Image (cartoon, coloured by chain):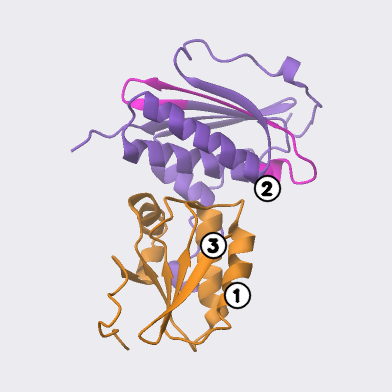
Chain colours: A orange, B purple
């Protein structure tokens, strides 16, 4: 599972550099993100704009990451493509995440709260 | 009746359903990576058949969930063959998935919804997704094999 990280005005952005977050990579995704979380930054924004397929195992892995963060740092999601957004909507998990259409521009103020 | 497991080879897997025509049919070994490869082939096939992106995404999701369940539960102890047969019929995609693993516990797909979102469930979404996106779902366990018939509606493109 390839991911990359960047600092965006104090937020930690984790970008999935893969087209699929499915049962085949759900575990390695969790492990890769767990390592990336050693870097500072809040909130944590998961950039999913390159992911065009998510199954329930992938969804479970995203939820697991949210739990991993505990109450200290918030997990937000960015760039859900139509097929990915559909899975969040069907399972109503879209109601528990803050969703961004796209990553805020570097230099733009980050929403807080 | 449910529960007898027969070792099968490619030779005694039931033949494709009549009418498959320009449909999609394959037999593959259970496993997450194998499912992924078959889903990519299916996606390409449906695209060449002119199926719209939304339906294509739905079919890929539903069938991936079905195959993941078979891999995880039906063939929990050892991988085995999964047969996938699909064709367009009217305003739907008709699919038949056959496996030779352990049947579903109640002899029917679970119907309980996943835990509410605020409980942050990490699983239990699969059958909910499958049920929501299909308009026909028939499961039968036969001596030695299990068969799931499902239909995914093709929605009119706006």
B144 part of magenta stretch: no
Corner quadrant of residue A96: bottom left
What span is colored magenta in the figure?
Answer: B71-94
Contact (Cβ within 8 Å) of mark 3 with mark 1: no
Label 2, secondary structure: give it.
helix
Residue B87, visible in the rendered structure: yes
Measure the alpha-carbon separation of dots 3 and 2.
15 Å
Determine which residue is flagged by label 1. Answer: A34
Q: Which residue is labeled 3 in the image?
A: A60
Q: Residues within 10 Å of mark 2 (few under 14, many from 20)?
A: some
Looking at this view, name the residue that lies furthest to the left. Answer: B158
Q: Position of residue A61 (x, y in %)?
A: 55, 64
Depth check, mark 2 against mark 1: the one in front is 1
- Measuring 54% from the left and 72% from the top, which residue is drawn there? A65
Q: Residue B127: x and y, percent?
A: 52, 47
Q: With A5 as the anchor, is A11 left or right in this view?
A: left
- How far is the residue under mark 3 from the one under mark 1? 15 Å
Q: Mark 2, chain letter?
A: B
Assess whether mark 1 and mark 2 are in contact (beta carbons under 8 angstroms).
no
Do dots 3 and 1 share one subunit?
yes
Read off the residue under disc 2: B72
* Label 3 secondary element: helix
Distance between mark 2 and mark 1 Cα atoms: 24 Å
- What is the chain identity of the residue bearing mark 3? A
Quarter of the figure with the C terminus of chain B? top left
Residue at image position (31%, 69%) is: A100
């Amino acid at each position: 599972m390839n991911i990359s990280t960047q600092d965006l005005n104090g937020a930690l952005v984790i970008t999935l550099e893969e087209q699929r977050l499915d049962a085949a990579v759900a575990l390695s995704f969790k492990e890769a993100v767990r390592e990336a979380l050693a870097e500072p930054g809040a909130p944590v924004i998961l950039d999913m704009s390159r992911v065009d397929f998510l199954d329930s195992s992938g969804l479970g892995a995203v939820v697991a990451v949210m739990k991993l963060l505990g109450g200290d740092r918030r997990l937000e999601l960015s760039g859900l493509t139509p097929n990915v957004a559909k899975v969040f909507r069907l399972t109503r998990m879209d109601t528990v995440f803050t969703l961004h259409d796209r990553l805020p521009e570097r230099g733009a103020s980050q929403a807080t709260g | 009746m449910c529960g007898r497991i027969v070792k099968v080879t490619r030779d005694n897997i039931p033949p494709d359903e009549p009418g498959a025509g320009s449909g999609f049919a394959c037999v593959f070994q259970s496993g997450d990576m194998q499912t992924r490869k078959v889903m990519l082939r299916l996606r390409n096939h449906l695209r060449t058949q002119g199926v719209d992106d939304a339906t294509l995404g739905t079919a890929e999701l539903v069938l991936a969930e079905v195959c993941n369940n078979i891999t995880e539960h039906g063939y929990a102890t050892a991988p085995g063959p999964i047969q996938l047969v699909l064709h367009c019929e009217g305003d739907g995609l008709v699919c038949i998935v056959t496996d030779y693993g352990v049947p579903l516990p109640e002899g029917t797909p679970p119907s309980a919804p996943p835990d509410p979102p605020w409980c942050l469930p990490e699983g239990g979404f699969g059958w909910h997704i499958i049920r929501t996106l299909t308009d026909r779902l028939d499961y039968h366990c036969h001596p030695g094999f299990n068969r799931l018939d499902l239909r995914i509606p093709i929605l009119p493109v706006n």
